[in-house]
Image (cartoon, rainbow, N blue to C red):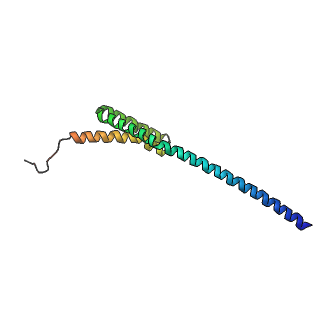
Amino acid sequence: MTTTKTDLAEATADEELRGVMDGARETAGSIADGVAATAGTIAARLPEAAATTRAAVDEAARRMETGSDQMLTVGATFSLGLAIGLLVGGANRLLVAVALVPTAAMGMTLLDRRAATAPTRRSGASS
């Protein structure tokens, strides 16, 4: 009689375990379906987001090229100050790096302008 109760208890435990495992499989499947649907939505919107970002970057580059040196200097100084303030304030380093991107862009534009207007020197022309 003891073996019958033990066999019955094991059979019940096996059924409960199978039920739990089936539920876990169904949950994992629904999560995978949700992730796949979300990835599909993101993939469908990615070209549009890339085009919008490219247009914004092109517009920013055009404005930097046509802007005055004073405007670029003020903009670079402001964004550098913002980045330093974020760093001192304990912000995430990635956020500080993103704040430095305009500084680098404006600084490079200023350097390009100065290099283009600098007089060229001849190395062999001495009197």
Residue 125 falls left or right of residue 12: left
Residue 33 falls left or right of residue 14: left
Front position in the image: 116 or 31: 31
Q: Position of residue 59 (x, y in %)?
A: 36, 35
Which quarter of the figure has residue 1? bottom right
Front position in the image: 37 or 58: 37
Residue 18 falls left or right of residue 61: right
The vertical placement of 45 against 17, above or below, is above
Which quarter of the figure has residue 73? top left
The vertical placement of 69 against 8, above or below, is above
- Residue lying at the far left of the rendered structure: 127
Q: Position of residue 94 (x, y in %)?
A: 47, 45
Front position in the image: 125 or 51: 51
Which residue: 84% across, 61% down?
A: 9
Which residue: 56% across, 45% down?
A: 38
Front position in the image: 39 or 120: 39
Which residue: 45% across, 38% down?
A: 85
Which residue: 82% across, 63% down?
A: 10
Which quarter of the figure has residue 83? top left
Q: Position of residue 24 (x, y in %)?
A: 69, 54
Residue 26 falls left or right of residue 73: right
The vertical placement of 103 against 124, above or below, is above
Q: Position of residue 50 (x, y in %)?
A: 43, 42
Count how many numbered circles sit on residues in the image: 0
